[in-house]
Amino acid sequence: MKKDIDSLIPSAYQVLKKVGIANEYNVIIKTYRGQISSFGSAVKNGSLLSAIAFFSIQGNSATERQKLMEAIWKLLNENQLIGNGIRNPENNRTKNMEAGSNNYIKELFEYVCLNKDDKRLKENIINCAIALKLAMNIYDLENDINAAMSNDSREVNNL
């Protein structure tokens, strides 16, 4: 399992930027770390489907937690961790989706619905969540969105 997670971290680092969790200044809002931890707990202590459904909308969260579901789906696809279900990494529909599209969440949800008894899928999704959390440590973390989006704060920190 540790080896599986280690192999996902470089890809997770890239995916965080692709889905917009990390911004152009290589900054992530700290609350994303808490959200991905909460997702992992929800999966381990509850149901994979209910966790995905809950994290598929922003709700009252300060962060766009649905981006985490997009990141997990991308990691599963890019690392060929899904089987012969409804989608696979070579599927053009999945490859051509726009970042931030709600279609990723639907694809993930549908795939899990069809494969809900697959224990390896659950383990892979948990491993993706762990890899994302670890990859977040490589980026600078900010407390709020305004600081994360400010180029001035990046310049001040580099002095």
Image (spheres, rainbow, N blue to C red):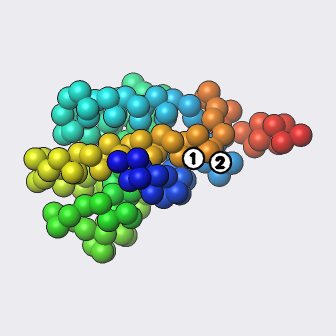
Disc tally is: 2
Residue 65 in picture, x, y percent from top left: 40, 37
Residue 101 makes an appearance in the image: no
For mark 1, give the secondary structure. Answer: loop
CB atoms at circles 2 and 1 under 8 Å apart?
Answer: yes
Q: Residue at (36%, 69%) from the top-left corner? A: 95
For mark 2, give the secondary structure. Answer: loop
The residue nearer to you, when weighing 6 against 128, is 6
Q: Residue at (56%, 31%) from the top-left corner? A: 30
Tell me the distance, in whole angstroms, between the alpha carbons under discs 2 and 1: 6 Å
Q: Residue at (12%, 47%) from the top-left corner? A: 116
Q: Which mark is residue 13?
A: none
Residue 5 makes an appearance in the image: yes
Residue found at the very far right of the displayed protein? 159
Q: Quadrant of residue 79?
A: bottom left
* Residue highlighted by disc 1: 22
Quick one: label 1, few (<14), some, or many (20+) residues within 10 Å? Answer: many
Quadrant including the C terminus? top right
- Left/right placement of residue 95 relative to residue 82 reads right
Q: What's the amino acid at mark 2?
A: Asn
* Residue highlighted by disc 2: 26
Q: What's the amino acid at mark 1?
A: Ala
